[in-house]
Image (spheres, grey):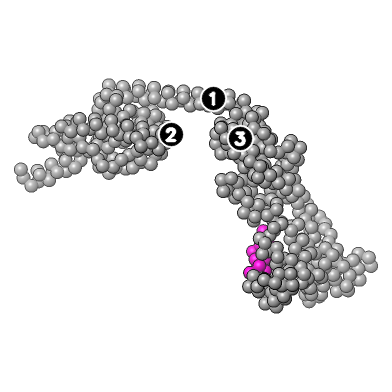
Amino acid sequence: MTASRAKHNRRGADRGHTGDQHADGADLHGVTRKLRCAVYTRKSSEEGLEMAFNSLDAQREACEAYIASQRGEGWVLVPDRYDDGGVSGATLDRPALKRLLADVEAGRIDIVVVYKVDRLSRSLLGFHKLIEMFERRKTTFVSITQSFNTTDAMGRMHLNIMLTFAQYEREATGERIRDKVAASRKKGIFMGGWAPLGYVVRDRKLIIQPADADRVRAIFQRFVQLKSATLLARELVLAGATNRYGHLLDKGVLYRLLNNRVYIGEAVHKGVSYAGEHQAIIDRKLWDQVHAILKQSPRKRAANTRAQTPALLKGLLFGPDGSAMSPTHTRKKGRLYRYYISQSVMKRGTEACPIKRVPSAEIVRIVIDQIRSLLQTPEIMVQTWRAARKTDKGLTESEVRVALLEFEPLWNELFPAEQARIVELLVERVDLQAGGIDLRLRVEGLTSLCSELRGACPRQEAA
C-alpha cells in the first residue's frame, strides 16, 4: 500500500461512511471500519428519575446491548452520554439533543441509536429536520425496537407513518389532559402550579396560611388607602416585602396579586371564574373597593394622588414680614400648578409683602436640600447624639452618624404622606427672605428621626 493510499484509508476510518466503505461497515478491500454509535435517551416527565435504575438507564442498556450485537459490523459505542430527562419530545430545544447534533455536525458520530422513534422526536416536522441533517452528514439513524431503513423510499414512508401516529398520540394525550384540567377547574379543584401568597398546598388543596394571609389583607387595605400601585409598590420594595417564592413585591407582582381571584375563593380557567374549593382570604367588599380604584385610568389615579399630596411646608413657611405663607394651587390648560402665597397679600393686596408667592416645588426642593446638608454636618450629628443619649445611655456617636446618613438615600423612596410627616418632625420654622431662607430644626425631631432610621423605618415595614 502506498503512503497516499494509506492516508486515504485513515480518513475513511475516521469518517465511518467515506471512501470505499459499504453501509455495513466494510470497505471494498474487506476491512471492517469502526462505526461510532451514540445512544440518545429521553423521558418526558421527571417522575422516577431519582431512582437508581430509571427509564433512561433502561433505554440506554437496551441500546448498548444492540450495539454490542453489531460489533462484527464495526459498531462501537462512543463514551459520551446523551440523556434528556424531564423534557418533552415536542421540541428540539433539549440540552442533550443539542450536544448530540453538534457532535453529528462535527463528524464525530456515524450512527444515532434510540430505543423508539418517539424518543428522538414526537413532532413530524421536527423529525424531518433531524433526518435531513443526518443524511447531509452521512449519519445513520436506528431504532432498535422498530426495524426500518431510512436509505430507501419504502423505509422513509414507514418512518413517516410511524411519526404521524406518534404525533397523533401526543396531541390526543394533550387534549385529554386539557379536558381534565378544564373539568376540574369548573369544580373549583386546584390543579397544581405555584400557590398564591397566603396559601399552602396540602393534599392537592389550597389551605390558608394565617401569617401570609394577614399580609395579603394588609396589602389590599393599604391599596385602598393610597389608591396608587406605584406608591404601594415603593413601600413594599423599601420594606423588602416578598412573596413566598422570594420575589420582591414590585409593581408587576403587586398588580398580579391584586387581580388574583383566588383570594375571593374562586378558581379561574381561561378567563372564566368558578366557585373554588378553598376558603377566601379577601372579602367581597374589600375586593370591590380595590377594583373600583383599578378601573380608573392610571393617569386619573395619579392626578388624584397628586391632588391629595400634602403640602410639605404647610404651617412652617413664613414670609419676610413674618406672616404665614399658605399652600394653594391653580390650573392652566389642564395642568396643576402649586405654590405658597403670603397671607398678607391675600388680606391686604400685592403690596403688603415683598415676596408675594413662591412655586411649591422650588421652595420644597430648597428646604429638603438644606435639611440633607445639615443632617450630614458634624455639629448636627453631635447635637443629635447628645440629645439622644438622655434616653439611650449606650448610644454611640458612630451609630447616630450612620443613622443620619441613611436619610439621604431613603428620602426619595418615601411616599408623600411620610415625607410630610418627617418634614413636620424635623422643621420648626422656615423664614423666607429675599436672599434665601432661614431654617430652624427641632432637636427632639432629630432624635426621633435617628431612632426611626436605626429601627429600619418601622412605619414603612408596618405597611
The answer to whether residue 144 is left or right of residue 22 is right
Q: Where is residue 417 in the image (x, y as percent from the top left)?
A: 76, 57
Residue plotted at (36% across, 34% down): 54
Query: Measuring 31% from the left and 22% from the top, which residue is drawn there?
Result: 158
Q: Which residue lies furthest to the right in this view?
A: 348
Name the amino acid, label 2. Glu
Q: Quadrant of residue 317?
A: bottom right
Amino acid at dot 3: Leu
Instruction: Identify the residue at image location x=67%, y=62%.
Output: 455
Q: Which of 319 and 174 is in front in this view?
A: 174
| Disc on res. 206 | 3
Question: What residue appears at the point 83 percent right and 57 percent down from the top-left corner?
Answer: 330
Mark 3 vs mark 1: in front: 3
Query: What residue would you read off at disc 2?
Result: 47
Q: Earlier in the sequence, mark 3 or mark 1?
A: 1
Other residues around mark 3 within 10 Å, as few (<14) / some (14–19) / many (≥20):
many
Gap between marks 3 and 1, in whole Å?
A: 19 Å
Label 1, secondary structure: give it.
Answer: helix
Image position of 303 (left or right of 104): right
Task: Identify whether 461 is placed above or below 427.
Answer: above
Tell me which numbered mark, 2 or 3, is placed earlier along the sequence. 2
Q: What element carries label 3?
A: strand
Residues shaded magenta:
401-413
